[in-house]
Amino acid sequence: MRKIIWCLIFISIAVRLIIFLVLHNNYFLRPFDPVYFGTLYSESQYVLGDLSKGGIGDDGLYAYAGYHYVFNRGNVADINFEHPPLGKYLIGLSILIFRNENVINIIYFILILLVTYKIAIFLFHNDLLAIISAAILSFDPLINDHLLRSLLDLPFTLFFLTALYMFLKALKKTNYLYLSFFFWGAAFATKFFPFFIIIYLYLLVIFYLFQKKKIFSFISASLIVPVFYLVIHISFFIYHPSLLEFIRHKKWMVAWWRGSPIIPGNILRNIFTGQYIDSTGKLTRDHLWSLLQPVIFFFSVTSVRKSFFGKEKTAGIVYIFCLIFIVYMLFLTNGIFKYMMPVYPLLIILAIKAVSDYYMIFFHGKIRHKGSYS
């Protein structure tokens, strides 16, 4: 019976994705138009500043930047220096292979569901819980909306989740550290994310507690991140063969982001009401909000149990990891829900586990920690 339920959920995910792609096929079949986007960019706020009569959205900006990087072999500092170039290179690769900037999002989407499934299996050894977690994520309006836009959030989420998954495996087999830091490097080379420093310190503490004798392996593997970051900026060094100039470029990036507003607590308003204060100070409705978001957030945060630090220590590590990220969202960002995407799959996994635990307590009077529920 369990296998039948698993198969039905898997089929529902596949059918839902196919229907979504068919209904929005224009987003994936429309050839990328470099002339249109080039004109849009040249007349945008990024070139003309306050004189611009129009504008260009982030998706158009990243698509044009990716096209410029790949087809024109352009300097990564020419267009959208605010973010590292990896995600835009991948958009350019999508244009090169598929003649469309959004097709690569389908690959990200499928891989994110797969990694979510694998993390859930790794944490709780329950295939049904894992497929339910992947299914809930696949139906979420936020991640579905990102399928239609050439943004950086999907690849960043994929690299972020994969890096964490590999780190969890490295707690048992150290060689996975190198894969983990490879994907942390990919994440850091996709979006500007200085909070990675805090994440790194947390991972260092955890690895020290579980693999004290191999802490040197952790430190040496972590060097992959800066090396990856430098390599992905190779075109910058072709146009500006100076490390000092590169450092100046990074200072400009940091200065740009220091101007971003911080709205403490805005993320909680967004999660529980579907509204948030935007950069202009106005209360705005989040059109991608769903009732499932506050439900998942509530159950995930309340999912901490003594068992997480007993038989399920790894789940406790993930739980604290999510709490640290939530604190970051609360006090160091503008609180827009899309910035929760890297840990949202983890919150879904924790929430589903909490619901299954409550079910076992209320109807069976106990929790079975390992294996499948009967």
Image: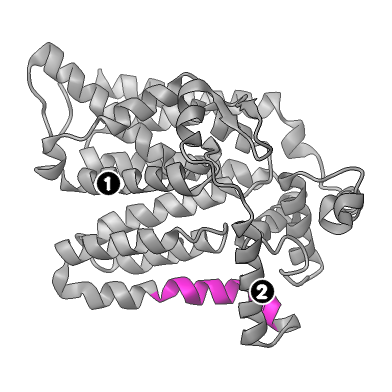
Q: Is residue 132 visible?
A: no
Q: Quadrant of residue 113?
A: top left
Q: Is residue 225 above or below residue 61?
A: below
* Screen quadrant of the C terminus: top left
Residue 320 is marked as 1
Q: Is residue 213 above or below residue 329?
A: below
Q: Earlier in the sequence, mark 2 or mark 1?
A: 2
Residue under label 2, please give it. 249
Give the magenta range.
Answer: 223-237
Q: Residues under labels 2 and 1: Cα distance?
A: 34 Å
Residue 225 on the magenta span: yes
Give me the residue at 60% from left, 65% from top: 254
Crowd band around label 1 with a 10 angstrom C-alpha radius: few (<14), some (14–19), many (20+): some
Side of 19 relative to 81 (left or right): left
| Callout 2: SS | helix
Give me the residue at 51% from left, 62% from top: 188
* Screen quadrant of the N terminus: top left
Query: Type of residue at label 1?
Result: Ile
Give me the residue at 24% from left, 49% from top: 317
The residue closer to the viewer here, 119 or 344, is 344
Give me the residue at 22% from left, 73% from top: 215
Residue 305 is marked as none
| Callout 1: SS | helix
Side of 208 relative to 115 (left or right): left
Q: Is residue 300 visible?
A: yes
Q: Is residue 294 above or below residue 237?
A: above
Q: Position of residue 294 (x, y in %)?
A: 42, 24
Q: Position of residue 155 (x, y in %)?
A: 55, 51
